[in-house]
Image (cartoon, helix red, strand yellow):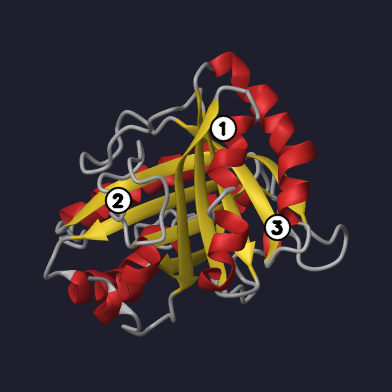
């Protein structure tokens, strides 16, 4: 029976008894955004004080989240100079990453489309920003540096990692992507992780956004040809950039699988509830 509040509370107990409710990160939302010049502080406060919660963490089946930032010196480390993901390659100084329970993508999307329409109607969507790279993704693999030791991928957005590297790989033909994924999982990533400050790499493939998404979010590119990697670092990415990350694009290209790195972008975690780093973005 409805409580009279208009929220249809009686349906929650019914829905809780249905469908998967594991903790594996079967899906992710990965979104890199550029606040327009002069709007950096206002954008950060809106995201920290409202949108991170109302537009993400309060939604069903989105169970972990973390925000990351690229100060100007980190932006200037990005590769390659000409990127199919970001134009210019320095665009997108904030990155938000969220885990969605495996098997709950469709359910979550029903809610997120509805809530974002409501937030927009209520004037709670900050317009002075550009979505540089925003995609829901399906989990394909996680490769660990230390085997069974240490946090698992389900902990990655709660563990106090000191940095993150976003890597986007494009494959020239869709039929080649499974071979690239297998090469990453069995050969390339284990070698790259050995002795590295990165404790794990999660690998995702993008999935199309629904047709009724908000108009300011463009449709996902490279659904059949793209892979998105998140490297979780135990040290500041600046310390190991040249030694560990700057050459990864060449290694991918030299594998002869028709793959190329379109973005290698380092970030550090934001400090929730603060404006730390906002004055270092430009």
Q: Contact (CB < 8 A) between labels 3 and 1?
A: no
* Relative side of 45 to 141, left or right: left
Label number found at residue 278: none
Label number found at residue 200: 3
For disc 3, the neighbor class at 10 Å (few under 14, some 14 to 19, many from 20) is many
Q: Is residue 42 placed above or below 9 in the rendered structure? A: below
Residue 20: x and y in percent read 69, 43
Which numbered mark, 1 or 2, is in the foreground of this view? 1
Q: Earlier in the sequence, mark 3 or mark 1?
A: 3
Front-lying residue, 158 or 58:
158
Residue 187: x and y in percent read 78, 39
Residue drawn where x is 11% and y is 70% of the image: 38
Which numbered mark, 3 or 1, is in the foreground of this view? 1
Residue drawn where x is 56% and y is 22% of the image: 258
Front-lying residue, 273 or 105:
273
Q: Is residue 118 placed above or below 51 in the rendered structure? A: above
Residue at the limit of the structure toward the right, as seen here = 148
Residue 54 visible in the current orientation: no
Which element carries disc 1, helix, strand or loop?
helix
Mark 1 sits on what residue? 253
Residue 32: x and y in percent read 36, 54
Image quarter in which the C terminus is found: bottom left
> Distance between the Cα atoms at labels 1 and 2?
39 Å
* Relative side of 77 to 259, left or right: left
Residue 200: x and y in percent read 70, 57
Label number found at residue 116: 2
Front-lying residue, 210 or 207:
207
Residue drawn where x is 62% and y is 23% of the image: 257
Front-lying residue, 229 or 22:
229
For disc 1, the neighbor class at 10 Å (few under 14, some 14 to 19, many from 20) is some
Which numbered mark, 2 or 3, is in the foreground of this view? 3
């Amino acid at each position: 029976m409805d409580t009279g509040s208009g929220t249809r509370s009686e349906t929650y107990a019914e829905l809780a008894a249905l469908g998967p409710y594991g903790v594996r990160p079967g899906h992710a939302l990965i979104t890199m955004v550029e606040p327009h010049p002069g709007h950096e502080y206002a954008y950060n406060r809106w995201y920290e004080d409202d949108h991170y919660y109302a537009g993400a963490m309060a939604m069903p089946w989105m169970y972990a989240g973390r925000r990351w930032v690229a100060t100007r010196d980190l932006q200037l480390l990005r590769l390659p100079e000409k990127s199919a993901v970001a134009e210019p390659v320095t665009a997108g100084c904030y990155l938000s990453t969220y885990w969605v329970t495996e098997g709950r993508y469709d359910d979550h999307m029903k809610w997120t489309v509805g809530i974002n329409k409501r937030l927009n109607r209520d004037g709670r969507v900050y317009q002075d920003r550009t979505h540089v790279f925003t995609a829901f993704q399906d989990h394909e693999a996680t490769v660990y540096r230390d085997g069974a030791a240490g946090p698992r991928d389900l902990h990655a957005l709660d563990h106090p990692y000191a940095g993150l590297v976003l890597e986007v790989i494009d494959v020239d033909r869709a039929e080649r992507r499974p071979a690239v994924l297998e090469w990453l999982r069995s050969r390339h990533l284990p070698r790259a992780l050995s002795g590295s400050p990165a404790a794990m790499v999660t690998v995702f493939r993008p999935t199309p956004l629904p047709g009724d998404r908000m108009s300011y979010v463009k449709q996902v590119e490279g659904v059949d040809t793209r892979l998105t990697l998140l490297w979780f670092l135990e040290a500041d990415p600046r310390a190991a950039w040249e030694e560990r990350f700057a050459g990864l694009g060449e290694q991918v290209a030299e594998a002869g699988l028709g793959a190329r790195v379109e973005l290698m972008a380092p970030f550090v975690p934001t400090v929730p509830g603060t404006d730390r780093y906002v004055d270092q973005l430009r």
